[in-house]
Structure formats: C-alpha cells, structure tokens
Image: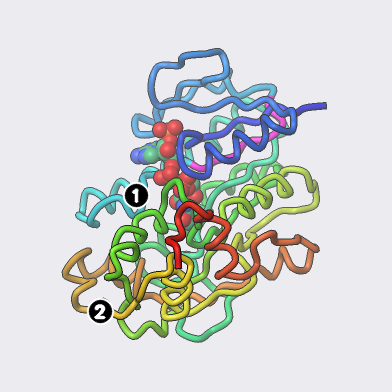
Amino acid sequence: MGRRVLISGASGLVGQALAAALRARGDTVASLVRRAPRSPLEIPWDPRGGWLDPDHLRGFDAVVHLAGENVGAGRWTAARRAAIASSRIEGTRLLAASLCAACAEPPPFLAASATGFYGDRGEERLDEASRAGTGFLAETCVAWEAQADPLRARGGRVVHLRTSLVLAREGGALAKMLLPFRLGVGGRIGSGRQWWSWIALEDLVAIYLRSLDEPSWSGPINATAPAPVTNAHFTRALGSALRRPTIFPLPAFAARMMLGREMANELLLASARVEPRFLTEHGFAFRHPELGAALRAVLGAREVAPA
Ligand SMILES: NC(=O)c1ccc[n+]([C@@H]2O[C@H](COP(=O)([O-])OP(=O)(O)OC[C@H]3O[C@@H](n4cnc5c(N)ncnc54)[C@H](OP(=O)(O)O)[C@@H]3O)[C@@H](O)[C@H]2O)c1
C-alpha cells in the first residue's frame, strides 16, 4: 500500500525529483510550504518565524527534510551565510520539535546533509566514521544534523544523507558549469588536484527511496558515487561529454576574486574524497557509478555537440 510522505524543500532540485519518484510508485506526497497552501497536500510552515502547527504533522509514514537556503546561489555575504546556516539549523530544530509534539512515536526522518561535513581533507579517504572537518560548511552540517537529536531521543529513526555534488541537467552546480564549458572556456580550478565527490540525481533519489524502505538504515549515509575524482579529472570528463576543449584553467586567486575567499575555498578548492561505505556495505547498486558515463547520461544526447 502506498505511504504518506511529507517533504520540506519539495520545490527544489532534489525535492521535485524525489516527489515524482514517490508518486510514480504510488506513495502520496505532501509538502511543507512557506507560502499559502494551494491544496490539502500542502502544509504551511514558517521556518524563519519558527511557526509550524504540530496538528498538521500527524498521520505521515515518513518525513523527508530537504529545506535550506541554496548554498551556491550567491556570494557568501554575512547575511547569506547566516541564512544558509539558520535556515538549516532553525528549520530542523522546528520540524523535529513539532514532530515530537505531534507524535508519541515520530515517523522515520530522512534529512539532507552534505559531504561538506568533512571539510577540506586532501587525499584522505572519508567514510561515515570520519570525523567532521572545520570551516563554515562543516560546522553548519554538524549543527544541522544535531538538531534531529530530539527525534533520536524519542527512539525515532533518523537518517542523514550526506550528499555530494548532485549531477542534474535541471539545476545545481553542474548546470552552472555548463555555460563556460559549452563556450570552451572551462578548465580545472586551482591545482585541479582537489577531490570532488559527486552523485547523479537519479542515484540520489534511489538512495532516498531505499532509506525510506529499509527500517534498519539510520545515522549518516554518504550519498555519493563510489568513484570520486579530482577536479582535473572532472574537468576533462565534462569537456569530453560536451566535446569541448578544457584548456583554460581558473587559478585559485581568480576563483577567490569571483566568489569571495571563503566560498571559493569551501565550494571549489576544498578536497573531499568521500566514499559511500554504508551504501556499498548494504548492497546499494549505483546506476551511475562512473563519472564519464554519468555525465553523458545526465546531459543526454541533445547536450552533446556533433563530433
Ligand atoms: N544539490 C546539491 O548538489 C546538494 C549537495 C549537498 C547537499 N544538498 C542538500 O540537499 C538539500 C536539497 O538540495 P536541493 O539541491 O534540492 O536544494 P534547492 O534546489 O536549493 O532546494 C532547497 C529548497 O529549500 C527551500 N528553501 C530555500 N530557501 C529556504 C530558506 N531560507 N528556509 C527554508 N527553506 C528554504 C525551498 O523549498 P520551498 O520553497 O518549497 O520551501 C527550496 O526549493 C539541501 O538542503 C541541500 O543543502 C544538495
């Protein structure tokens, strides 16, 4: 029988794809919305103002929490940094407290997190047992995950999907990279030796579905493909998928001038060689385990220029 799943941040890149996949298999999807609801399947909340009516949260079989200010949407001014952190920390605190108030036994809670948790770690191979890193994103992720503690204390099942760079045509970091690469002015960033972990959107959706379906899955799960690559490798693979040259490196100082020091350091120049140990040990089969094929699948034939 189909389940009733509540999603926050449902209008985003991951939320739209996940909601479609849930509906396709017969589940009912309701969403938390920050505007006036337009249907009975929309539940209002005001994460900024700290308002959510617990009465609206009863009767769900699972809650998927994706909401948060977009990390890559603009320069990290003090106001944007505050919004990135507080939308996640305060939003999760509010949702967890409201679920505890609404339900004696909270439903499974699947929460987005990010591989930014591990910070800038050079060549180190990182799995779920690795310690947290330092820096703005790492500290935000630690605090974001901790806000689900009240659900854990109630005996609730909580999963944190530490998500790497999501490859999708529709949006996210890859969509932003496409223009310079299509114009033939894409290239490695800084030394190109920093590790980038990535995941195809289709696999990420499958990981959310599996996390929902497996009652024994809980705790942090690295939602990332099994073959992280260096930025230089990523650059070559993207150029090759688009059949464009990648001969114009972007020096680190130029990246820092474009985005600001901290944003460039943490989003582009940081090295995180994250491996999906939990998923591998639990037999998850990636549809897109290798970057070149994943990029070709994600970008599709239309995107690829004739040879
Ligand atoms: N995409 C990636 O590469 C990636 C990588 C690592 C981690 N993640 C994490 O996975 C989650 C989903 O990612 P995504 O790519 O789908 O993100 P997204 O496209 O930016 O969507 C996030 C959604 O959160 C809600 N939101 C935006 N600003 C908010 C705010 N200030 N307060 C509360 N809610 C806000 C919006 O939904 P409503 O308007 O419907 O409320 C928005 O559509 C995010 O938490 C993200 O940090 C994503």
Q: Quadrant of ligand 1?
A: top left
Quadrant housing residue 194: bottom left
Identify the amino acid type marked 2: Ala
Quarter in which the C terminus is drawn = bottom left
Residue 164 coordinates in the image, percent (x, y): 51, 62
Q: Is residue 162 left or right of residue 265?
A: right
Identify the amino acid type marked 1: Ile
Q: Determine which residue is flagged by label 1.
A: 84
Marks 2/1: CA–CA distance: 24 Å
Q: Earlier in the sequence, mark 2 or mark 1?
A: 1
Magenta range? 60-66
Residue 36 coordinates in the image, percent (x, y): 40, 16
- The residue sitting at the left extreme is 257
Which circle marks residue 252 in the picture?
2
- What colour scheme does the image use? rainbow
> Looking at the image, which residue is at 48% across and 35% down?
94
Residue 129 visible here: no
